[in-house]
Image (spheres, rainbow, N blue to C red):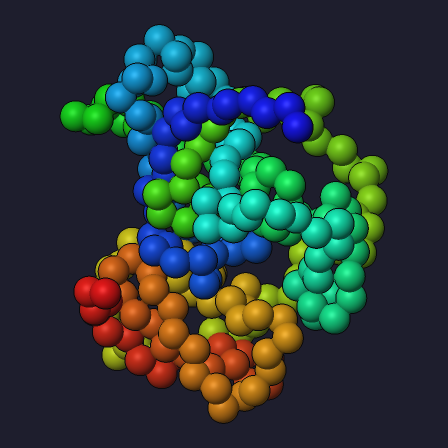
């Protein structure tokens, strides 16, 4: 089988150490902030010349936690409750012949650091450390298709109310509160789980956040500092 090599040009630094809690699509939680740090070979300011004229970027990246030697022609989309199989190419499942993801993020700015020019972005759905293969500008006249149909996922899923006690919310850095609340509102649970008594744990921005979901709402029950290991 013909193969081609591809280079990692950058990695993202986000508040998600694990996959659990990462939004299912980019742009769903605009309050999320992340940084794109280029690999030493690509820390050339000229490569970003003109990028600040664009409001959004396309990121092409690797589902680094979903790389497999084999593949299946069908997968179980979470949107369908994990109970129905669809063709892998009719889904955005990470389990694909090539574990490549595509995300649209908002460019918030370019920061000059000891690691070169770093892109500040919002709305990313990438786990911390995810390798990025390429970055391209979003072009509204070509990339926006208002008349497009969404197949079996025509609209974004419903968001949940979030009950976040003030005492627990105060343990979250102020600049992370909107992002965390937005992530919880997206219902991080697997779609096939619905036990209202089950307590879930999520790592976010150096914290362990524990919550349960019942009656269309997320109830935060504990916030502690993340434990090593």
Instruction: In the displayed orientation, state which residue is furthest to the front.
Output: 1
Residue 198, image x, y percentages? 48, 86
Kindly identify the residue that appears in the image at 70 percent across and 51 percent down. 72
In the picture, residue 229 is in which quadrant? Answer: bottom left
* Above/below status of 53 relative to 29: above
* Above/below status of 2 relative to 65: above
* Above/below status of 78 relative to 140: below
The one of 161 and 89 positioned closer to us in this rendering: 89
Residue 164, image x, y percentages? 38, 76
Residue 216, image x, y percentages? 59, 79
Residue 13, image x, y percentages? 33, 42
Kindly identify the residue that appears in the image at 56 percent across and 22 percent down. 4
Kindly identify the residue that appears in the image at 34 percent across and 64 percent down. 203
Q: Is residue 48 left or right of residue 74?
A: left
Answer whether residue 221 is visible to the viewer in this image: yes
In the picture, residue 44 is in which quadrant? Answer: top left
Answer whether residue 30 is visible to the viewer in this image: no
Kindly identify the residue that appears in the image at 71 percent across and 57 percent down. 75
Q: Quadrant of the N terminus?
A: top right
In the picture, residue 51 is in which quadrant? Answer: top left
The one of 209 and 65 positioned closer to us in this rendering: 65
The one of 129 and 66 positioned closer to us in this rendering: 66
Q: Is residue 38 left or right of residue 136?
A: left
Count of marks overlaid on the render: 0
Instruction: In the displayed orientation, state which residue is furthest to the left.
Output: 114
The one of 82 and 103 positioned closer to us in this rendering: 82
């Amino acid at each position: 089988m013909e193969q081609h090599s591809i280079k990692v040009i950058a990695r993202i630094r986000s508040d998600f150490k694990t996959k659990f809690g990462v939004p299912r699509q980019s742009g769903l939680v605009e309050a999320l902030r992340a940084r794109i740090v280029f690999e030493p070979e690509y820390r050339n300011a000229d490569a970003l010349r003109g990028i600040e004229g664009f409001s959004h970027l396309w990121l092409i990246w690797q589902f680094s936690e979903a790389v497999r030697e084999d593949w299946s022609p069908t997968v179980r989309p979470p949107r369908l409750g994990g109970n129905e199989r669809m063709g892998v190419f009719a889904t955005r499942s990470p389990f694909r012949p090539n574990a490549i993801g595509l995300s649209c993020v908002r460019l918030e700015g370019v920061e000059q650091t000891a690691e070169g020019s770093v892109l500040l972005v919002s709305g990313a759905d990438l786990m911390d450390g995810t390798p990025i293969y390429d970055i391209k500008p979003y072009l509204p006249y070509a990339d926006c298709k208002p008349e497009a149909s969404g197949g079996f996922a025509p609209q974004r899923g419903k968001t949940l109310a979030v009950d976040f006690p003030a005492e627990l919310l105060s343990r979250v850095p102020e600049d992370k509160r909107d992002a965390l609340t937005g992530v919880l509102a997206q219902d991080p649970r697997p779609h096939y789980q619905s036990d209202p008594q089950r307590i879930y744990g999520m790592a976010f921005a150096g914290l362990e956040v524990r919550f349960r979901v019942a009656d269309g709402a997320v109830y935060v029950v504990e916030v502690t500092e993340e434990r090593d290991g």
